[in-house]
Image (spheres, helix red, strand yellow):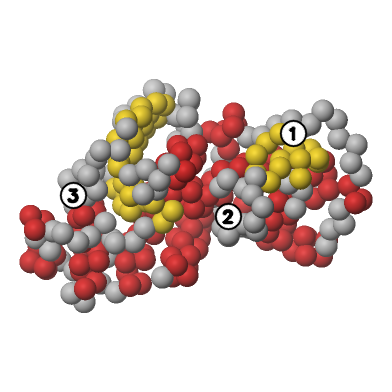
Amino acid sequence: MSLSSSFTDFSLAELFQLIDQGRKSGCLTVCTLPDLHAPGSKSHYYYIWFRQGRVVAATNSLNGQGLSYKIIQRGWANQQVIEQLCPETSLATPLGLLLKTHGVLSAEQLNLLFASQLQQVRELFAIQKGVFKLDSKAAVPLQEMTGLSLRTIEVALMAVRALKDWKVLADVLPDASSGITSITHNKPQIHLHPLEWQVWEFANGTVSLSAIASQLNQPIAIIQQAAFRLMLVGLVEEIPLAESTLNLNDYPMDFNSLNSSVSQFQKSKQLEPHKISTSFLQNLVGFLKSKA
C-alpha cells in the first residue's frame, strides 16, 4: 500500500486514525513546504515508522544515526561504545533495547528517548502546508528503534490535545448544531481528560454541541475540539440534529467537580510554548511507565 496526499486534503490526525484502524506497518514520510513569504525558508523531511498500527520510531533523516545522536548528545554513551556493542551490519534487535541489555541504558532513559521521538511527531500535527507519503513496504530501521512502541491513535490524541492552533483541523471539526452518539457499548478504555468525559456523557445523539457548550459553560470551539478527540479515538460519531427540544435539566451536573476540571483544563491551555513541550514530555514518560 502506498498513499500520497497533502495536508490540505487529509489531516495528519485522520491519517493516524487510518493507520491505527488498519493496523498498518511501514514508513510515513512528511515534507513541510517552505514559507514563500519567509526568505531562506526550506522544506524539511520527517520519518515515522509504524508496526501493526503502533508508532515504533521517528526521526528527521534517513542516515540511521538519529537515535545514536540523541544518546550521544545526552552523554549516555559515545559513538565507539555504540558501534562496538551494536554493529549496524549485524543488528537484529532494536538499538535501544540492545543497549539496555548491555547495561548502557536504563529503562528510564529508553522512555525519555522514545518520548523525544514522539515529541517530534507531536510537532508535525501543527503543520498546515505539507505533503506526505505512506509506504507500507518500507522496512523498519532497527538502529532508530528504542524497542518501545505506542498505539498510533494514542499518539494522535496526545498531539491533538497539545495543539495550539486548530486552523489545521477547522474543516474536520463537528458542526455546532450536530450531536454526537456513542459507537461503543463499553466504557472507554483509553484515558480521557475531565472535559472529554463531560462531553462523553452527552453522547446519546439528542443534544447539540452548542447546547452542551451552554450546559458546561464552555466556548463552543472547546466543545467541538473535545468532541473531535472523542471521534478521533473511535468513541463517538457526529450525527445531524433537526431541532433539539431536549430539556438539559434532565442532565444534572456536579458543578463542583466540573469547575475544578474546567479550571485545570483552561490553565493547561494557557501554558507558554516551551512549557507545553516540557509538560508533554513529562506526561508521556509517565504514560509509558504505566504501560511497562
Give the mark nearest the N terminus, 2 or 3: 3
Lower sequence index among marks 2 and 1: 1
In the rendered structure, the answer to whether residue 172 lies left or right of residue 81 reads right
Q: Quadrant of residue 117?
A: bottom left
Q: State the separation of the CA atoms marked 3 and 1.
A: 47 Å
- The numbered dot on residue 64 is 3
Q: CA distance from mark 2 to mark 1?
A: 30 Å
Structural crowding at the residue carrying mark 2, measured as other residues with C-alpha within 10 Å and reported as few (<14), some (14–19) or many (≥20): few
Whether residue 75 sits left or right of residue 228 in the image: it is left
Tell me the number on the disc at residue 178: 1
Mark nearest the camera among 2 and 3 is 3
**Residue drawn at (28%, 61%) of the image:** 146
Is 67 situated above or below 226?
below
Can you see residue 55?
yes
- Quarter of the view holding residue 237: top right
Q: Nearer the viewer, residue 92 or 59?
A: 92
Q: Dot 3: what SS? A: loop
Please state the horizontal and vertical placement of residue 120, each as a whole percent of the image. Answer: 38, 49
Check disc 2 and give the amino acid type: Leu
Q: Which residue is mark 2?
A: 271
Name the quadrant of the N terminus: top left
**Are circles 2 and 3 on residues that touch, CB within 8 Å?**
no
Q: Residue furthest bottom?
A: 103
Amino acid under disc 3: Gly
What's under tag 1, amino acid-wise? Answer: Ser
Q: Residues within 10 Å of mark 1 (few under 14, many from 20)?
A: many
SS under mark 1: loop
Q: Give the distance between the C-alpha atoms of the residues marked 2 and 3, in whole angstroms.
A: 34 Å
The x and y percentages for residue 118 are 39, 53
Q: Earlier in the sequence, mark 3 or mark 1?
A: 3
Residue 28 left/right relative to 78: right
